[in-house]
Amino acid sequence: MNVPLSTDVRPTSMHSQPRVPSSRTPTTMVCYGGGEYRRPVVSGNWKLNPMTSGEAKETLKLLAANQRALEESGKDIPEVILFPPYPFIPLASELLEGTTVAIGGQDCSLHDKGAFTGEVSVSQLASLGCNHLLVGHSERRTLFDETDVEVNKKVHLGLNAGLRVMICIGETEDEFNVNLADAVNEIQVKKALAGVTAAQMEDITIAYEPVWAIGTGKVCDAPTAQEVHSAVRRVLDELYPNTGVAGRTRILYGGSVTPESIDVIMREPDVDGVLVGGASLMADKFSRIIDFSSPLLVRSPPRVLVAKEVFKVGHTDGL
Ligand code: PEP
């Protein structure tokens, strides 16, 4: 159900095309009040957590209960994607069934099949009902030496398997401190998207995750994130001129997002959603983030949370 836009909606230029939450629209754009807008996305990356399927089950049950309540409230809500560890994907699909939460793989093998012990292929992910694939997370790049060339290969593997691909980019603290953020992000975007057509960009989301903000509790301040997102959009415009790609591609922010910081970051016109690590492991926190409040909308304030957390996960241990 759409809710009326407030009167301060910005014009739909490439850099300031506004977002509005929508409910179940399966596309990246949503028609609203006579205009087309990028549909916001809230995604959760569970990484190597939780430790057991029992814990995963408890969190998923709570998340499903929260999500059903939110969807039944008639509020406009963002697209929601959860990236659980591979062994918990079937459990997540089962327990989130009946909600609009989509499931994705946190990474994929560079190989389709064969003698590659420990690997998981895109076709295996797709066959489990995954619609999404996360690639190029900074932990893959730094801890597992993943290169831009490999990220690009994974982008193509995901697209060819019919998955929507979320590409993570982001500079380190040292790079940020010497004003190299835009340069680093430009290179990562261009390399990750090599050979990706304008049509395929409909299935691509970019997640800007400054490495220094991941799992550190340091949230990039909203105006800085806006500047970086706007710069990334300019890169997309350069790569795909006169196609509308730059204006349609969702660019998410990731790095220590919490219920306390979500509303501020989502006020920025080029921040189209978030990728959440630590806070996505706690159903109530993640649900509050999904229920972010938008200045573009006339809507009721975020609801009172209902689920009871059964386990807590610290936020400073690299989650
Ligand atoms: C992430 O790892 O993608 C992330 C954003 O983590 P956190 O929210 O814990 O900083």
Image: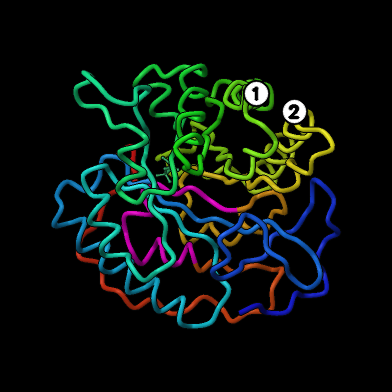
Q: Is residue 57 left or right of residue 294?
A: left
**Residue 288 in magenta?**
yes
Q: Position of residue 122 (x, y in %)?
A: 37, 35
Q: Position of residue 318 (x, y in %)?
A: 33, 37
**Residue 47 in magenta?**
no
Q: For numbered disc 2, what is the local secondary structure?
A: helix
Q: Quadrant of residue 102?
A: bottom left
Crowding around mark 2 (Cα neighbors within 10 Å: few <14, some 14 to 19, many 20+) is some
Q: Dividing the image into 4 quarters, which one contains the N terminus?
A: bottom right
Closer-to-camera residue (226/108) = 108
Closer-to-camera residue (229/213) = 229
Distance from disc 2 to disc 1, alpha carbons, whole Å, reads: 8 Å
**Which residue position holds label 2?**
239
Q: Residue at image x 25%, y 45%?
A: 49
Range covered by the magenta-colored residues: 273-290
Q: Residue at image x 85%, y 50%?
A: 13
Q: Residue at image x 78%, y 73%?
A: 33
